[in-house]
Amino acid sequence: MDKRCYRKVNVLLRVVFPVFIMSLLGAGCASYTAQTQKVSQSWDMGNFQAAAIQITQEADKRGNSKDAIIWRLEQGAVLRAAERFGESNQAFDKAEELVNKYEEAAKMSVSREALATVTNLTTLPYEGFAYDKIMMNTYKALNYLQMGDSEKARVEFNRAFQRQDDAVHINTKRIEKAIEEGKKQNYNVDLAKVNRDGKFKSQFDNYYGDLEQFKAYAVYVNPLTVYLDGLYFMTHATGGSDLERSRKSFERVLGMIGENKYIRQDMETLQQVVNGKPISATTYVFFETGQSTEREQIRIDLPLFIITPGVPYVGAAFPKLKYRSDYISALTVSYDGKTEAPLLLSNMDAVVAREFKNELPTLITKTLIASAIKAGATYGAYAGATDGGRKNSGAGLAVLIAGALYQVAMNQADLRTWTTLPKEFQFCRIPTPADRKIELDPPYLGRKTPVVIDEGVVNVVWVKSVNRNSPLSVMQFKLKDEVKTIASPETATTVQHIPQTDIPKPEQVTQQPESLMSGAETQHEVSEPQAQPTQKNEAIAPALENQPEISMPSQ
């Protein structure tokens, strides 16, 4: 196609884009946020009962839509906070049914994938991220424990473990599918070349450099889930294999989050169980605080000429994580004249950011392809209407305007994300006081919450706070309600005592710095405890340089 065509389109896009960006693109930006706004208002005030009614109405409306999974996840979390545990699990069951349906499919629907490249990625069904699926089964397990059904809780912990195990393979398949789609559309996406473009890299580093602020957990692993797994199989062990699983889970959590006195105490308790001794009366306090990330829309100029020679930079919409800072960062637990402070167990911002970072290569590949298709359609229509820009300039101008408006209107980032997840999970353990009374005190807020611990040998007090102004919500369940030992001399020999020096410290398991856009990790990291320090943002795609390119015939 004539270079004059590209120049005219480029000029038009530079003029039209700023004019229509707020009216058309902004509407797409606010779509998911606007849909959840009414629920969010009740949720932010800590009015979980009102939020539960509202979210159920909205989720039921969208039960057969492309957004069904995300709405059912939100519904499950809100109903759980409202202590409607059975209904919460029904919502999670509906989400899981759809999740399994997508996972079991041999490949994505070609028609849906093709539609997404022509329009935008929001036209695809929300299939759930790995952290969604892991938390879904974790919450289901906790709900069953709240309802006193420990056997069904065991099933959910097993499913959560399997979710973590499968996630690496599933994400690898996503990248392969993106590459396949590029081949079908005859576009060559070389992320190494994209990375070397100075303009793109500068914008990318500016927007996504904050992903390196977190200490990284192992890919697709949530320390909360792993810790609860250890706690469950210690208190509900039926034999040596359960106790060994508990030991490995505690060990993995220490490897991920670093030294923790409460987990050390758990390992001592576990050894007592192995040796045939009963667990002494213990109370665990979990603090679920704040709200996890939202997503906002940003614009990055894509070097489209890398895959379509002669086509200029095209502004494309991308999602960016937005961290929420309004939360109670600490809690004090008082009992018998003593105090304990819950320690950080799982930073959900870090969990989400790790997976978001890992998804970026696929996201950029798909966005490049979609942008190329939309720009190519405009250029092709212009050339056809004007004989390559040589005549009928009026018709050509109309085509360019229509094409530019179409690109702006369809240039929307996928901002769907599970917004009712917390920002952090903290925890502590204490010997259950004789009077079974504790007091919860968020420092500097001037309000204390007394709690009387239910009957039981091993109890859990689950505390939830949405933000600094919302009240604390407190619920309880029993992990163990009777003194019972299961160990025998044979059992004791199957579970080894782990001395303190056997647990890797964070600095001993630090990984080498990796690129923000190094692509999906293909190694099986679920079983390996890892930690990673904050790193400086580097190039986006060096690890993808050796991947096979998507070949493109000359046009």
Image: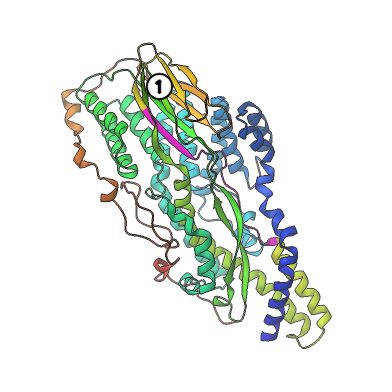
Reply above or below: 387 against 432.
Answer: below
Classify residue 389 as left or right of residue 176.
right
Reply above or below: 239 against 513.
Answer: above
- Magenta residues span 410-428
Can you say which quadrant of the picture contains the N terminus?
bottom right
Residue 444 at x, y percent in the picture: 49, 30
Task: Tell me which secondary structure the magenta stretch mostly adopts.
Answer: loop
Can you say which quadrant of the picture contains the C terminus?
bottom right
Residue 393 at x, y percent in the picture: 81, 83
Residue at label 1? 334
Helix, strand or loop at label 1? It is strand
Towards the viewer: 408 or 71? 408
Classify residue 532 as left or right of residue 121.
left
Residue 414 in view here:
no
Residue at 50% from the left image edge and 38% from the top image edge: 136
Reply above or below: 214 against 306.
Answer: above
Looking at the rendering, which quadrant does residue 490 occupy? top left
Residue at 78% from the left image edge and 80% from the top image edge: 385
Mark 1 residue type? Ser
Q: Is residue 423 magenta?
A: yes
Towards the viewer: 50 or 120? 50
Residue 422 at x, y percent in the picture: 51, 38
Towards the viewer: 42 or 28? 42
Q: Alpha-carbon neighbours of circle 1 within 10 Å: few (<14), some, or many (≥20)?
A: some
Towards the viewer: 444 or 105? 444
Residue 413 in view here:
yes
Q: Is residue 225 magenta?
A: no
Classify residue 285 as left or right of residue 67.
left
Reply above or below: 204 against 549.
Answer: above
